[in-house]
């Protein structure tokens, strides 16, 4: 359960599949009824007990073992809980979301046999992780809170709460859950998760150090591969494509079935100009781990290469994969909205994202997508508050900076536009095969700033350079989320306050070292 939240670099957090085998297997009481498996299933069990990912073959063996177990002993609550958790992890490995309904049935059967009131924390944690994997963040938080009420000392509870609260944009609650997890557990998976928290705060050097430590202390090949792939993702986001490639190739040496490492390698190869190899890797990834966000990335590479027919096939695949996942309870509206904004119907993208916002899904990623969709739909003034929310929470995303810069350019704020588009290219000069060239062209069109500096240093003029106004964006974004789609049709207003998503304004706080303080004890005020 301490395994990282899976993200890809271009459209991170869209997968959202938290791998939960270890959480359920470590929950109190599972061994009393579950029985100890042997062979590969035992290896999966041991990996889970250490909070590490299981090798695919071992996980398949564990699923088979638990299926046999529940057929022979249908009143075995522990075996049902283990089986449900294993289905969720298997779905994350393969993209087979048809396993999610099976997981739901197994976990609820566990609760029927042993109700939560009798201490069935395992099933509650499993249901929370399943909800998060389906991007139902509110349900994930509810299940996690129920599990915490039963056993506050179970470390398995807290990754569920971290992921759910991050999905809802409640970073304070996520930070508190992370603090408790660090108090209750340690090891490479906790370090890896902490690295992602630091990355989200913009503390890239600290994140890289923690990710390195996680890889160095990993004990199994599957765990090592996951840690190396995480290092690759962080290197990619820093604009270091060659280093990212090295990490992902090392991950594939440890685990040739690590499809997410293969996706990371494809991304890095494309940035390095090795586009034929990148296309080959994307084909393999989509055959073995068919996720909509990967189809979108592969399509945009084909698009950038002028392969319109191939790109169209991939873009159609995005819609197909989102629709197929929806049949199994997975909310894919964020990736679908990103597709619609750039390649389909921007007004439809706005409507999709208004639905996400009303559900309380207010992460930086949703805010960025909303801002860009509004801009693409011709509503730049409504878009800017969302872009400010996305860029004001610490995460140093080249995509977010570029989106904000283009919105500002449309509004005639050429100084801020120049700054943010330039920031995008400094953060990662190859952040997108389609948008990075567009960013370079936009920066060239903007030209150099006028001699003598901005007309008004304090930001009242069009070339304002102050940064700290993101805190004002929450209220404006709240209004924009319910302002209707691009055609003028009214939309229901958001039901929850945007305050949880609002970044802090003001001067940056001092940053703790990883070993001395937890991320949530400081202000996430922006990039280093």
Image (cartoon, grey):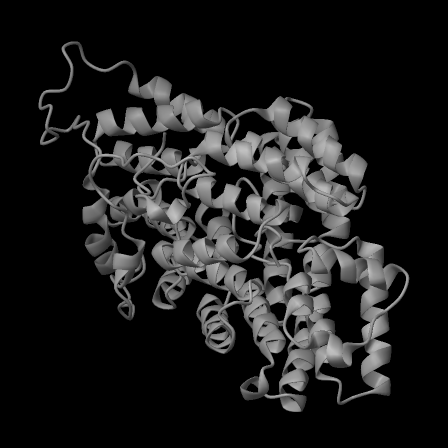
Classify 406 as above or below 105.
Answer: above
Give the residue drawn at x 73%, y 45%: 259
Image coords of residue 360 (percent x, y)? 37, 65
In the displayed structure image, the side of residue 239 where residue 23 appears, left or right: right
Q: In the rendered image, which quarter is residue 509 located in?
A: top left
398 with respect to 380 (left or right): right
Name the residue furthest right: 39
Residue 132 in sight here: yes
Identify the image quadrant of residue 468.
top left
Q: Nearer the viewer, residue 75 or 92?
A: 75
Image mark count:
0
Q: Quadrant of residue 422?
A: top left
Q: Looking at this rendering, what residue extends furthest in the top direction?
A: 451
Q: Nearer the viewer, residue 456 or 215?
A: 215
Looking at the rendered image, the quarter that the N terminus falls into is: bottom right
Viewport quadrant of the C terminus: top left
* Residue at image location 21% in from the left, 31% down from the top: 413
Is residue 310 visible in the rendered image? The answer is no
Foreground of the two, 264 or 162: 162
Q: Position of residue 166 (x, y in %)?
A: 43, 56
User: Residue at position x 52%, y 41% from top?
Assistant: 195
Residue 176 locus on image (x, y percent): 40, 57
């Amino acid at each position: 359960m301490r395994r990282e939240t899976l993200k890809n670099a271009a459209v991170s957090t869209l997968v959202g599949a938290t791998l939960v085998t270890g959480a359920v297997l470590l929950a109190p009481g599972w061994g009393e009824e579950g029985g100890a498996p042997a062979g590969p299933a035992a290896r999966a069990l041991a990996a889970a007990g250490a909070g590490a990912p299981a090798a695919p073959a071992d996980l398949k063996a564990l699923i088979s073992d638990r299926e046999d177990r529940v057929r022979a002993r249908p009143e075995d609550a522990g075996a049902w809980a283990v089986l449900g958790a294993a289905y969720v992890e298997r779905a994350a490995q393969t993209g087979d979301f048809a396993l999610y309904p099976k997981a739901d049935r197994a976990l609820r059967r566990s609760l029927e046999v042993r109700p939560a009131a009798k201490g069935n924390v395992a099933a509650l944690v499993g249901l929370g992780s399943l909800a998060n994997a389906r991007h139902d963040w509110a349900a994930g938080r509810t299940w996690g809170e129920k599990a915490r009420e039963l056993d506050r000392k179970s470390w398995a509870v807290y990754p569920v709460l971290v992921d759910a609260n991050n999905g809802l944009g409640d970073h304070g609650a996520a930070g508190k859950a992370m603090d408790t997890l660090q108090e209750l557990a340690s090891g490479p998976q906790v370090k890896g998760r902490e690295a992602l928290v630091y990355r989200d705060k913009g503390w890239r050097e600290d994140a890289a150090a923690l990710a390195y430590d996680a890889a160095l202390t990993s004990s199994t090949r599957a765990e090592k591969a996951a840690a190396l792939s995480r290092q690759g993702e962080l290197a990619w986001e820093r604009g270091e494509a060659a280093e990212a490639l090295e990490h992902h190739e090392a991950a594939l040496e440890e685990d040739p079935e690590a499809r997410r490492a293969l996706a990371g390698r494809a991304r890095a190869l494309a940035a390095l100009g090795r586009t034929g190899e990148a296309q080959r890797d994307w084909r393999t990834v989509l055959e073995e781990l068919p996720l909509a966000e990967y189809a979108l990335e592969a399509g945009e590479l084909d698009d950038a290469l002028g392969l319109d027919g191939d790109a169209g096939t991939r873009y159609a695949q995005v819609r197909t994969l989102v629709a197929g996942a929806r049949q199994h309870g997975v909310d894919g509206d964020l990736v679908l909205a990103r597709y619609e904004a750039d390649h389909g119907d921007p007004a439809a993208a706005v409507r999709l994202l208004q639905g996400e916002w009303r559900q309380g899904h207010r992460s930086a990623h949703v805010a960025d997508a909303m801002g860009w969709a509004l801009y693409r739909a011709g509503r730049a003034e409504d878009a800017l508050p969302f872009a400010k929310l996305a860029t004001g929470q610490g995460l140093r995303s080249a995509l977010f900076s570029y989106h904000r810069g283009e919105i500002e350019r449309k509004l005639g704020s050429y100084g801020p536009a120049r700054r943010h588009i330039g920031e995008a290219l400094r953060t990662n000069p190859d952040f997108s095969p389609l948008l990075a060239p567009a960013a370079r062209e936009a920066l060239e069109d903007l030209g150099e700033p006028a001699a003598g500096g901005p007309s008004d240093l304090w930001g009242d003029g069009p070339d304002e350079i102050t940064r700290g106004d993101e805190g004002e964006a929450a209220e404006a974004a709240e209004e924009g989320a319910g302002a209707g789609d691009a055609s003028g049709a009214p939309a229901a207003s958001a039901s929850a306050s945007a305050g949880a998503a609002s970044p802090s304004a003001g001067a940056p706080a001092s940053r703790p070292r990883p070993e001395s303080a937890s991320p949530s004890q400081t202000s996430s005020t922006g990039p280093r």
